[in-house]
Image: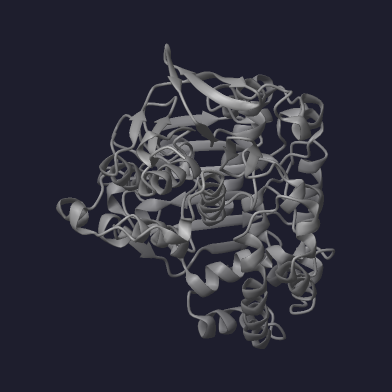
Amino acid sequence: MPARSAVHVGVIGAGPGGLAAALLLARAGLRVTLYERAGQVGGRTRTITAPGGYRFDLGPTFFLYPRILREIFASCGADLDRMVELRRLDPLYRLVFEGGGELAASASPERLARDIAALSPADGPRVAGFLADNRQKLAAFRPVLENPFTRITDYLRPDVLASLGRLRPFTSVDRDLRRHFTDPRVRLAFSFQSKYLGMSPFRCPSLFTILSFLEHEHGVFHPMGGCGAVSEAMAMLARRLGVRIRLGTEVERIDYAGGRPQAVHAGGSRDEVDAVVIGADFVGAIAQLVPEPVRRRWGDRRIDRARLSCSTLMFYLGIEGEVPDLDHHTILLAKDYRQNIREIEQGILPPQPSIYVQHAGFTDSGMAPPGHASLYVLVPVPNLRAKIDWQAELPRYRRLVLERLRHLGLDDLERRIRFERVVTPNDWQDEFRVGRGATFNLAHDLRQMLWFRPHNRFAPGTYLVGGGTHPGSGLPVIFEGARISVRLLLEDLGIDHRDLPILDEAPLADAADERVEVAA
């Protein structure tokens, strides 16, 4: 094996997976170039500044289970919490049930149980049992999440077999929750999180009840300055470890010879590489970057037939005046939520959509000018396979969304809008290169998880990170997936990741106490 510093790895895409992979590879002593087509790191995990001083998270709006990222920072000689202030929210969010009732999801299990009892007396005492059950479920699932599935026989690993009884993989999230809660509103309070995967709680495998458990057990965090602050901190650390970050540089193609990557063509240059890590959206990029003979298990036909998540219609609104009725996170859950989800799956624009609103200024005054508010409005909608004419539909649907926001106390929103940006599924595909506008990547069903998902070691010398590979979508899972992919890459080079020392924090001491500010 050549000296580690002579091994050059090209990482494509400076989203959360690409940034984590670049950090870990540089920490191992490899030479790393990180390519990003945008002028800012983070991918969709970035914070944008609009005219008038309004600031918005572009995609993810909170951090969940930061343990994994803290460990990545620590292994690289840095302290995440000294570079970014992660503020734990209480309540986690406010749920508004259109059919009647509200729930402010407290960070205190005891208060949460009392508030649920006010909504459904029989269900309040059952919260503790749900949390205990999912504590055991997470413990059983962690070995599955933290290890690759490189061959079909990995399903016979002792850790996988031992987890089956606890995970109940052939039961849906909603059906599993029926063991704990009788009121459908309460079940929805612990299952709407399947939308983080772009899926329905009535179809999503029951193991994903751990999503709501993670929120209640480990907290929901707002990075001060927006989620982009975490991406910027990762980039700062990567540069200090020697990573070359090329912003505004689109990768046109990868040269292959003998099934292995030889060079990356980007920004008019050809960089020879020994390996590549692809963090770009799987459906949107893989066919362009990797020749079909190299990706034998995921040829064009299979990609075209893959089951995809839903999309989202986004409104980024700069509002004059205060919005006292909104918490940091507020979710309007449609009266017939099951029908709402069914319409999205069938490619129909829901006439009564559920809506999520982030009012980051509730916690972070720097997200809007004084006396104003920045509102992030997300509406789950079908992906582009539905062939909806968004140019024709958008004016009508915008009016519908603004009308439904009255349920959240936003009665006079239209006249107070001073900035507005809309992102449709077409924009996700055309501007952000999200394949078919499926913002949560490949669907997370049993036939597209674990061994059936695109592998972390996608081909010799080619590795994947991001929501399109194992373990799947969601920031903590993507960070774990980056650790898996880097571990495989190092193993293929003959490097045992367990032999790598934890870096001393001293070389980074000049930055250790600096809180990252997001660039405009």
Measured along the vertical axis of the image, is residue 70 above or below residue 22?
below
- State left or right for residue 99 relative to residue 93: right
Instruction: Give x and y (percent) for residue 242.
Output: 29, 39
Name the residue located 68 percent from the left edge and 44 percent from the top edge: 455
Q: Quadrant of residue 5?
A: top left
Question: Which of 165 and 490 lies nearest the eye of the viewer?
Answer: 490
Q: Quadrant of residue 79?
A: bottom left
Instruction: Give x and y (percent) for residue 34.
Output: 41, 32
> On the rendered image, what quadrant is the C terminus found in?
top left
Measured along the vertical axis of the image, is residue 216 above or below residue 416?
below
Q: Quadrant of residue 298?
A: top right
- State left or right for residue 276 relative to residue 267: right
Residue 418 appears in the rendering: no
Question: Which of 444 and 140 lies nearest the eye of the viewer?
Answer: 140
Q: Residue furthest bottom?
A: 125
Question: Which of 167 and 417 lies nearest the eye of the viewer?
Answer: 167
- State left or right for residue 505 relative to residue 448: left
Name the residue located 27 percent from the left edge and 55 percent from the top edge: 83
Instruction: Give x and y (percent) for residue 10.
Output: 46, 31
- State left or right for residue 478 relative to residue 325: right
Measured along the vertical axis of the image, is residue 348 above or below residue 214?
above
Instruction: Give x and y (percent) for residue 65.
Output: 49, 64
